[in-house]
Image (spheres, grey):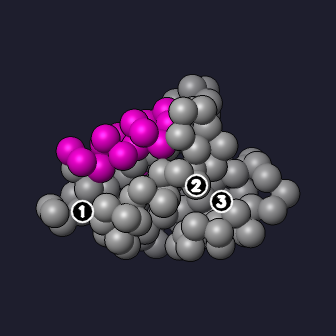
Amino acid sequence: MKPPKAGHVLLVEDDDDLAEVLSAALVDAGYSIELAHNGLEALEATEKAMPALVLLDMFMPVADGFEFARRFDLRYGRAAPIVVMTASENARRLADQIDADDVLAKPFGRASLMHVVSRFVRTK
């Protein structure tokens, strides 16, 4: 397995508008982004390049965040930290269920996003 790609964030989000806003903010801050719209796309992306961080929505079609986390852990263990992004009232509980490294409760602002991402990822 290749080491995580420096400055690379895998954004797993099925809401196109939110994904666009988050991607733009992260690119503006100097991160490279891979976007996946569901857990299966996210797994395919990790096969190509291991991200330095996974920002993971929990409720998506095809394969949700729980399925992604389970398969990712089976394949790669803790190769990259996972930050759960969810609008659920039980955001922390959901993050704990997949042993996520942190949680961003939706809605969150740019400052919160940058604070969490910068804890796990260094830009190039």
Can residue 37 be seen from the camera position used here? Answer: yes
Q: Which mark lies nearer to you, 2 or 3?
A: 2
Extreme residue in the left direction: 2
Which residue is under mark 3?
A: 104
Q: Looking at the figure, which quarter contains the N terminus? A: bottom left
Q: Nearer the viewer, residue 39 or 110?
A: 39
Q: Position of residue 117 (x, y in %)?
A: 48, 62
| Closer-to-camera residue (83/69) | 69
**How many angstroms separate mark 1 from mark 2 (CA)?**
21 Å
Between label 1 and label 2, give the one nearer the viewer. Answer: 2
Circle 1 residue: 4
Q: Is residue 15 above or below residue 82?
A: above
Q: Is residue 88 left or right of residue 51?
A: right
* Amino acid under disc 3: Leu
Q: Quadrant of residue 118?
A: bottom left
Q: Marks 2 and 1: in contact by CB < 8 Å?
A: no
Q: CA distance from mark 3 to mark 1?
A: 22 Å
What segment is highlighted magenta in the picture? 28-48
Say which element carries label 1. loop
**Residue on which disc 2 sits:** 66
